[in-house]
Image: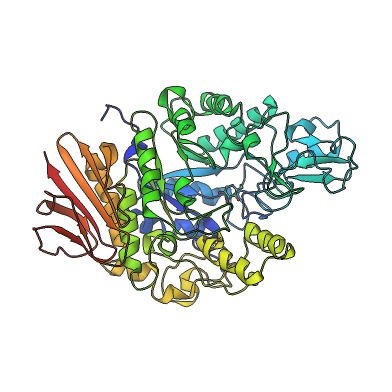
Amino acid sequence: MRVNEPWWKTAVVYQIYPRSFADSNGDGMGDLPGVIGRLDYLQRLGVDVLWLSPVYPSPQDDNGYDISDYQGIEPVFGSLDDFDILVREAHARGMRIVMDLVVNHTSDEHPWFVESRSSKDNPKRDWYWWRPPRPGMQAGHPGAEPTNWASFFSGPTWELDPATGEYYLHLFSRKQPDLNWENPEVRQAIYAMMRWWLGRGVDGFRMDVINMISKDTSLPDGVPFAAGGLGNGWPHFVCGPRNHEFLAEMNREVFGDRPLLTVGEMPGVTLEQAVEFTAPERREVDMVFQFEHVNLDQGASKWDIRPFHLRDLKATFGRWQAGLAEVGWNSLYWNNHDQPRVVSRYGDDGPCRVKSATMLGTVLHLHRGTPYVYQGEELGMTNAPFTGIDDFRDIESVNHYKEAVTAGQDPAAVLAALRFMSRDNARTPMQWDDSPNAGFTTGTPWLAVNPNYKDINAAAAVADPDSVFHHYRKLIELRHTEPVVAHGDFTMLLPNDEHVYAFTRSLAGVELLTLGNFTGRSIPVDLPGWAGEKLILGNYPPDGNDGGIVLRPWEARVYRRTV
Ligand code: NOJ
């Protein structure tokens, strides 16, 4: 452990998806006063940082990831006064606030874009990616788009604006035009906005798809997914040529020496790239969100669901732990607002829900890196029993259904994939208690509450010492009190075992062994010498067996010894 380690190495972040967290005024959408009302709950859990998904003014095409004003609060969520109160009240409880920074794109209703689209010679024209139709083709004809790239939310990444006869680029929905970071005015406007939020007291930024801000300016076509169809633009906009330069500039212009937390969301980032993004001396970002461990159950696309193999998870995490051991830092997460619930995905959301949720939490939190808890994960919230397409609200899910069914796929199969993988699984309202709508709202929730809220809710969990909540509370406390959890070296054990996740952490003569049984059966573990050591955390009562270790279904154990 080095001296003067940054504070976020011992911190745990809690992600709030405000529209689904707590509704204070009965309009069916969560809001900032709702968050303020739950700060004591979060303090009790023990988290250090609250990351707020976007609360800025927005047409809500992508639930706020389409921002029309970077320096305000969406009225549905409250006001800037509410925001200031939230910052003050969180700080008073020892918790910091991290904002979602969505600057790869704006909303098409942002005044910058409204100006930009108004004419070809508008001074803001170059703030976005405008291009004429493909040479020799007529605007509006299929295939006339400047590139063949597929959008994340189905269809092409280009939208024709009939007023000027040119297309604009949108990697996400057509209401999310991409900003042109090549233009220094764009960058300066973003930095000024970021400084303004820091002036309001925020403690850092989670940067949305920040590895997509630098594109290959020659805009080449991607390899088509199918003959004559849309192509894969990833190689041309992921971790592009000026990505490091832009982040270093942002860091210089905005962060200075403030003790902030910065985390870049980076789909497709490789370990080698992550080392560069997070190396402290390069002064870019503190950590990145990588995606390898949440892509393990997917084939060609996220809707192509494959069996999950524990060995793959170990290989992935093991590589990232080793790769960022000397330089840089890991973020650790199972869940966020884009991922299905982990207990339904890599655990068992049936009879072993509590055991598997606590085992998954233990394995993750004992790794080296900064853990992120997504709202409801600390309750073991599960995927939702969506029955038809009308139950979904997420633009990605709804668009995919339309596109896939139009292309001739079996609607039942498309629905089955959505039920497992849709982002709406993460977005069902937070389950506070067993009153109507789980205590989330007195109105009609914008997305149906998961009917299992009568059993799975915060009030019940707080009252039950064996709940997922209290297990997460202990994990967070352990990180705060036991230096080896934050700073120790990591060694993966049993890499080829298909059932048991096992690793040690060690620092200054203290060694921890973490074990997780990823099955619903009892499994003996062949790790001699540990059975009699001190068990400092587990999700079962001790079995009193000092002879050898036999893990019970979904059991997790953390042993400690001094060497
Ligand atoms: C990543 C965000 O996490 C996701 O929710 C959003 O749809 C896209 N970026 C676009 O902003």
Left or right? Give the position of 335 relative to 562. right
The quadrant of the rendering that contains the N terminus is top left
User: Which quadrant of the figure has residue 214?
Assistant: top right
Residue at 63%, 64% (x, y): give it.
393
Number of numbered callouts drawn: 0
Can residue 328 be seen?
yes
Write the residue at 49% across / 68% down.
Answer: 440
Q: Is residue 382 left or right of residue 529?
A: right
Q: Nearer the viewer, residue 201 or 266?
A: 266
- Of residue 200 and residue 383, the one placed in the foreground of this image is 383
In the rendered view of the protein, which quadrant contains the C terminus? top left
Please name whichever residue, 57 or 277, is drawn nearer the observer in this view of the structure: 277
Image point (37%, 55%), residue name: 42
The image shows residue 84, relative to residue 468, as above or below, that is above
Q: Is residue 149 left or right of residue 96?
A: right
Query: How is the protein colored in the picture?
Result: rainbow
Answer whether residue 201 is visible to the viewer in this image.
Answer: no
User: Percent x, y for residue 484?
Assistant: 23, 40
Q: Is residue 151 above or below residue 394?
A: above
List x then y, in percent, for residue 378: 37, 59
Q: Position of residue 349 (x, y in %)?
A: 40, 68
Q: Quadrant of residue 394?
A: bottom right
Left or right? Give the position of 302 relative to 57.
left
Q: Give the x, y percent position of residue 358.
A: 31, 60
Classify 80 as above or below 525.
Answer: above
